[in-house]
Amino acid sequence: MIFGFHPLEGGYDVPMRVVGANIPYEWLIYLIMLIPVSVFLFGFWKKLEVWLLAKGEIHRNDKIAQRIWSWFVFSFAQARVIRKPLAGWMHAFLFWGFLLLFMAAGIDAMHNMIGWPHLEGNIYIGMSWIVDVIGFLGLIGIIVLAFVRYLQKPERLNDTKSSDGWIILLIFAILLTGYFIEGLRIAAQIKLSTTLQQIAYERVASPFGWMFASFFGSMSVDAMLMWHRLLWWFHMAIAFLFIALVPFTKLWHIFASMLNYAFRDLEPSANRMVYNIEEAETFGVENIEDFGWKDLLDLDSCIRCGRCQENCPAYNTGKHLNPKITLIQNMKAHLDAKAPYLLAAKASGAEVEEMAMTEEAAAEEVNPMEQSLLYDVVGSETIWDCTNCRACMEHCPMFIEHIPKIVEMRRNLVMWQGDMPGEAQMAFTNMERNYNPWGVGWAGRAGWLEERGVREMVNLLPEDGKEFEYLLYAGCAVSFDDRYKRVGEALVRLLNKAGVSFGYLGTEEYCCGDSARRLGNEYLYQTLVSQNLESFNNYGVKKIIVVCPHGYTALKNEYPQMGGNYEVYHYTEILAKLVAEGKLKPSKPLGVKMTYHDSCFLGRHNGVYDQPRKVLKAAGGQVIEIEKAKEFGFCCGAGGGRMWLEEEAVLKDGIQYKRINDTRTDQLLVPNPEMIVTNCPFCLTMIADGVKAAEAEENTKVFDVAEVLWKAME
């Protein structure tokens, strides 16, 4: 009988269990359930209202199949979460334990509400075993996660709140009472059975339930039945409390993260484009509501796991920037405080400014309507600290997009507020006047060819005009940095030796614009790109070899935003290909012990890790992998345009931190290598300075990949 009382019985002839047995008035639960579900839906709507306040445009309605797959893999396989093994797998256990127990409860509810048939026989045993075991792993998961947070206390969890503990306790109570209830049911059924064999199938179907049943063996059947009922109602009450709390606590990340997985950026690593820049009325982001809806969703997705903080070079050298706290969490707190006023303004049709001096706002100690996002909430020091190394985005299990937010705020500071470091202004001036951040006269851009004795090996397009397969985009460093000119020479000699047909633009090559864009000067960036695209198209360029990873990222990932679609390769990719094809055969294996520095823009931004290593090994290098390598690589400190900004060593909380480049150099020096190898002009400069500061120049030399391979060829 539907919604009728079912007394608990001993085992059954066919393995099964009766849903709701021993629970008087069980049908009430389906009415009570409407309360937490209504609260949840209300909370979801309030979250959606806030996301819809966003004025910025972010379109994520493309590649539907890929987005569905992303949602599935990262939600249910926990692919990003388990990258950190202990915490990740425990979280996966918890997620799947909760999910399967919820699904099992849903099947039970459907049985009573729509007559869903009982699970019986081997199907019941198999399904019950899966739920029982995975659920118990979830219980272990929450215990281990509590141990990590409160006893192990890793530094990345340095902002634990009291609510974290209550949420952990609530989840633990839900899971534990579930096993107590199951144990009491099985214990009572054992006593009610005529023979143990009658209920023996539960030993397999519910191995942990059977284990819990042993705790209650000394109780009378009446006591078991009474406690089973009491704990069942208590269990349902705290489960419903959990559902109601989801939109209003950190539990909301369960659903926000799923949305983030579906709407994450599927394009290659690139800054967001400003279209029709000549017609723009403002630049960048000045107020929290100026961001796009995905940016606001990001703030709700943050679980404060600290993986971004743990890998941030700025934070780890004592800077103001902490991607978790001073960026995302500060922005989230500001949005939560400001949203009621924005919603009220939207409902009344008033301008946002008119809401700034309401009586309620005036009574507050801090009026969120009068707080500056750039100066009061995030802080300009935080905004300028970022090296755009992408470690935060690479390691965030929720796919939060930190860098685009920072660049948008830099754009406002530079192009709207006119507030920027003096060194940034100097770099902009140099790029405007001479098309390079060094400020050296543009007319000498091809002078390095004569200086390094490789002019006859190069098809200088404005003068020679020969046919070519690849364009060599040498970049500003090869042209104007005396140390890096040697790298350009080595690369030219290698390409010439391999018989690669390439051309070079010389004075018709302009700065790629990466530093301008990442420092916030989008207008200058687009100007430089337009000049380069004109040169590329004039010579019918199809394939490009780029020397600098920053230029490589710009040309490959960002130039298509302005119509520049080419086959773009970093020179290490080309060298690895030539070595594999036998067109470059090192004749003098170096046999040198070396450490290799993964540049952020070649590595995390573009996933190129193996090709440079293959080149070094072909050259006879004994590459020693250090702890901070590949996707865990530590930045040299020059990315995000910071090559042109001063960095001071920080004394903070009694700790004397080193500069980012010195910190990275120390990591590379740990194995006492004879050589440190880089693939980027900025990295070469920063690491060479670090070796000098460490007074290790006598024992350790710094070279580029191209130089190492050429040494093995000579």
Image (cartoon, rainbow, N blue to C red):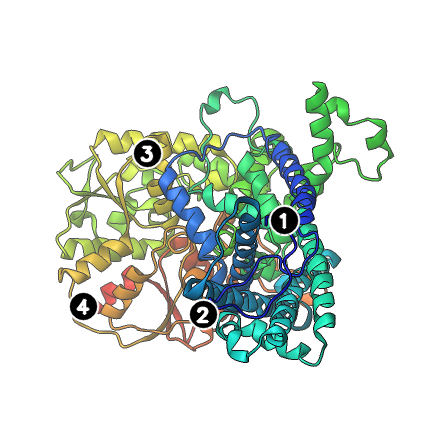
Residue type marked 4: Pro
Of the two numbered discs 4 and 2 on the same chain, state the one appearing first in sequence: 4
Query: Residue 138's x, y, as percent?
Result: 56, 65
Instruction: Name the one closer to the observer, 443 or 148.
Output: 148
Can residue 125 be seen here? The reply is yes
Instruction: Name the one closer to the observer, 138 or 503.
Output: 138
Residue type marked 3: Asn
Q: Is residue 356 above or below residue 168?
A: above
| CA distance separating discs 2 and 3 | 36 Å
Instruction: Name the one closer to the observer, 32 or 440.
Output: 32
Residue type marked 1: Phe
| Residue picked out by circle 2 | 668
| Residue picked out by circle 4 | 586
Of all residues, the one furthest to the bottom in this rendering is 218
| Residue picked out by circle 3 | 532
| Residue picked out by circle 1 | 3
Give the residue drawn at x 47%, y 50%.
Answer: 639
In the picture, residue 95 is in which quadrant?
Answer: bottom right
Of the two numbered discs 3 and 1 on the same chain, state the one appearing first in sequence: 1
Q: Is residue 378 above or below residue 539?
A: below
Give the residue drawn at x 41%, y 42%.
Answer: 67
| CA distance separating discs 1 and 2 | 69 Å
Of the two numbered discs 4 and 3 on the same chain, state the one appearing first in sequence: 3
Mark 2 closeness class: few <14, some 14–19, many ≥20 residues within 10 Å: many
Of the two numbered discs 1 and 2 on the same chain, state the one appearing first in sequence: 1
Q: Do tag 2 and tag 3 residues touch (Cβ < 8 Å)?
A: no
Mark 3 closeness class: few <14, some 14–19, many ≥20 residues within 10 Å: many
| CA distance separating discs 4 and 2 | 25 Å
Give the residue drawn at x 42%, y 54%.
Answer: 604
Give the residue drawn at x 66%, y 42%.
Answer: 34
Residue type marked 2: Leu
